[in-house]
Image (cartoon, rainbow, N blue to C red):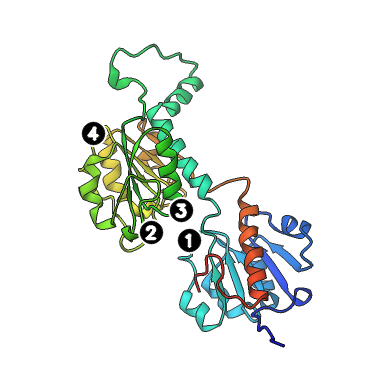
Amino acid sequence: MTLTTTLLPAKDKLRLCFAHGAYNMKPIFDRAGHGIETIQVSTYDDLQACLPEVDVLVVSGLWKNDLLASTGRLKYLQSVSSGTNQYDLAALRERGIVLASGQGVNKNAVSEHAIGLMLSLTRRLALARDNQAKAWWRPEQTDPAEREDELPGKTMLIVGLGGIGDRIARLAKAFDMKVIGVRRDPARGAGFADEVHSFRDVKALLPRADVVVLSCPLTDETRNMIDAEAIALLKPTAFLINVARGGCVEEPALIAALQAGRFAGAGLDVMAVEPLPKDSPLWSMPNVVLTPHTAGETRRYEVNVLDILTRNLDKLWAGDTALVNRIV
């Protein structure tokens, strides 16, 4: 008989904590009848207080690396977010704590949001909403440059052709657009894009793009990738969509270019500083559509996170450490 060594205690001995300021995951998880003791907290202080008696933690924004001093029993940390920059990976590894990310849980939401920002700009939906608030019926435009635009035949450049970027490409193809993808390793393929390149080719590709979409992680390679030099390479008619991270764009250069009308406009879900300061010029620019880092929001977020969690719990109880989205 072969004994399976597992990282976790048995179900009836395990204590699982959900820690998030907005997502209500405990009742959804409990309704599935897993037979696991669960608790839910929404503040850092409450998390710190309960953490010593927790075996599995599901968390994102409430996590601070100071909490590592309180992880007496913790063996598995499931990040609610796709990004894991907030976790000290070396310290987790040293303590034997497994970390998995939430990568993919908001793939549909973010990709659809990127398309929504693009359509808001090309079809001037944000302007129409502004006019609605003023009860002003805009007359037909004699100047073609002031009219709404259409997408077939235009070129989209997607910087970050991962799960989100590839779905953006798929949606863009439905609008009969040409799609150029950029990814860290082009050998992984173009997916739904027509062609694929590496990050070092971004500036050479920018002049070809009618719409530039950032859906890449924030790394040393992508930080301030869209700087003044890159912005100067954009077509005057181009749009920039950022559903990645604010740090991927040199924001002062972006603001200066938008104020000067150097390119057509931007749809921004992420900013360098969040919340966006009230004195930022971005708030009042007619050629900018802003959303408050909500691209990843979806009514299915909790369900999607819990799907990864339950699959990984089953793997760990079976002695399988090849977890979904394993980071450490």
Q: Give the mark, 3 or 1, whose residue is nearer the N terminus.
A: 1
At 66% from the left and 84% from the top, the residue drawn is 5
Residue identified by numbered label 3: 163
Q: Note whether 238 is above or below 137 in the view shown.
A: below
Q: Residues within 10 Å of mark 2 (few under 14, many from 20)?
A: some
- Single out the residue that lies furthest toward the front: 1
Q: In the shown orientation, is residue 14 left or right of residue 283?
A: right
Instruction: Point out the image quarter for the N terminus.
Output: bottom right
Q: What residue is shown with label 2?
A: 218
Give the residue type that dot 1 points to: Gly
Q: Secondary structure at mark 1?
A: loop
Residue located 24% across and 46% down the image: 205
Q: Quadrant of residue 51?
A: bottom right
In the drawing, does residue 256 fall left or right of residue 111? left
Q: Nearer the viewer, residue 70 or 294?
A: 294
The CA distance from mark 3 to mark 1 is: 13 Å
- Mark 3 or 1, closer to the camera: 3
Please say if the residues under marks 4 and 3 sit with CB atoms less than 8 Å apart.
no
- Is label 2 in a helix, a strand or a loop? loop
293 on left or right of 259: right
Q: Residue under circle 1? A: 83
- Asked if labels 2 and 1 touch by Cβ distance under 8 angstroms, the answer is yes
Tell me how far mark 2 sits from mark 4, CA to CA.
Answer: 26 Å
SS category of the residue bearing label 3:
helix
Q: Amino acid at mark 3?
A: Gly
Q: Which mark is residue 236?
A: 4
